[in-house]
Structures are given as C-alpha cells and as structure tokens.
Amino acid sequence: MVRTHTVVTNNNHPIFYRKMNSSIASLKNSVATLAISAAICSTLHAASIAVPNGSFESPSTLPVGVSTSIDSWQKASQPAYFNPATFGFTWDQTAGIFYDTNPYANHDGTQCAYMLSFPQVSLFQDYSTTPAFNATYAVGQSYSLTLGLFGKSLTPNNSLQLSLYYRDAGNNIVTVGSPTTITYNPAIFPTTAPLNLVDYSVTIPAVQAGDAWAGKNIGIMIQVTASDFTGGYWDMDNIRLTSAVPEPGVASLFALGICGFVARRATQRRKSIS
C-alpha cells in the first residue's frame, strides 16, 4: 500500500497573512539596503582631476574688466570664412574672459569666459598646449567633463559642443566618444534675475586596453558648432573633469541579492506552513 501525505494550506488563516506581511516588509528593507549600498559603491570610486584655470580666474581682467587672453587655454586658428573687416572685430576677440560684475549666482570665483557665437570659435587644452594638464586616459576608468553654461541673445539656430579628445601620432586632435551638443533654448536660459549657469556634461565609457586613446593625454574642447550670426554669445565657468571606476558588478549583485533573499524567504515560508 502506498501512503500519501497531503498538506492543506489555508491562505485565509491569520497566521498566513502575518507571515506574508513580515516577508514583504523584510524584502522591502533588504531592497532599500542593497540600493543604498550600490549608490555608495558607485560614488566612492569617483575622483576629481584638476583642470588648469578651470574657473577662468587668470589673468586678472581688472581694471578693464575683460581680456582676450586666457591662461592655460588655446584658441582655434581663424577660419577662412571670417573676415575682420566684415564683422568689425578680430578673430582673437571672439573668445575671452570677463569680470562678472552682474554675477551668475552659481559662478566659481569672480571671472567667467565668453565665446561669441561664430562657428569654430573654440577653447581647448591638453598636455601639448598646457604641460600642467598631464592627466591621461587610464584603462578601466570612465571620464566626465562638465561646465556651467549660459546662452545670451541667441536663437535655436545656435549650438555649442563639449568633447574630450586625444592627439594621435601626427599630433592631430581626435575626438573620444560622442560629444555633447547644446542647442540654445530660451526656456533653459531664462534672463530673469538671478541668473544661473546651467551644467552640461560629456561622458565617455571606461577606457579599454585596446583603445587608441588608452594612456594618452586627456584633451578637453569647447567649440561653437552652429550660428546664425545675430551677435549672441555663450558665457561659461567652472570646468570640472572627473574619472570613475565603473561598477559593472553592482547591478548584478543587486539583482542576485534580491533573488537570493526571495528564494530564502520562500523556503522558510514553505517550512513554516508545513
């Protein structure tokens, strides 16, 4: 004779509901703990990289209040389309620094940089132009470049590009990853006081050993890419560069932790019901 044992589960029993509620509460607490741990792990691996004259404080613009010289930064050569006689000023005057007398509420220091909205107006730096900027693309690390920006007297036909680059064997500038393009939008840059610079960033993924830029010096570039020549300009300040070691295992560990917890609670529940 074969004997069978039947387990009858009463899902309406008060004890069952108490156990279920307890399991759900524990699950919520564990999920929250794992999420916080993941965020902390990601944050701890970020590092700041010094950018020479990143807040455009040098040289001092006083007593005049403006200068076309910007220490540590380089400008692109004058393009063929630009005729000083036509526009009424020199190419060198299309970018410079100024004393922020009507300050942006979130500026860094007392000076900011400006770029007139003419295609190819650029500010850039790397080790070959600024030896003090000797950071390199390290394998296993990702990089983010951020600046505070504000567009004035512009239309949506104007745009600016933010990018990271390296120099190849021929000393040519080669962009790394995908640049960030900022198109003027009056809703993003309201002119009612107090004015605030708006942060924009470009990020490249973790450098791989086989990447052409691995081990090469980091270059940063800010460049006007489109204009309708209506006399507008871009103000900017507080250039920040950070590196980070990605945590590819964090998401997997997070999911694994939840699955393990659920499996363990399910086993305990079956045992207690039996």
Image: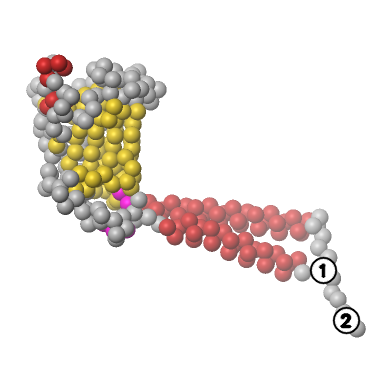
**72, above or below 206, in the image:** above
Helix, strand or loop status at disc 1: loop
Residue 259, picture quadrant: bottom right
Number of disc labels: 2
Circle 2 packing at 10 Å, graded few (<14), some (14-19), many (20+), is: few
Whether residue 141 is in magenta: the answer is yes
Residue 226, picture quadrant: top left
Q: Is residue 252 left or right of residue 135?
A: right
Q: Residue at x 53, y 58 (%)?
A: 255
Residue placed under numbered mark 2 in the picture:
2
Q: Is residue 23 left or right of residue 247?
A: right
Residue range highlighted in magenta? 138-143
**200, above or below 33, in the image:** above
Residue placed under numbered mark 1 in the picture:
7
Helix, strand or loop status at disc 2: loop
Q: Is residue 28 left or right of residue 216?
A: right
Q: Residue at x 84, y 71 (%)?
A: 6
Query: Where residue 29 appears, x then y in whole percent?
Result: 57, 54
Query: Where residue 239 appears, x then y in whole percent?
Result: 25, 38
Q: Is residue 259 visible?
A: yes
Gap between marks 1 and 2 measured at Cα: 16 Å
Q: Main secondary structure of the magenta part?
A: loop
Residue 200, picture quadrant: top left
- Closest to the observer: 18 or 264? 264
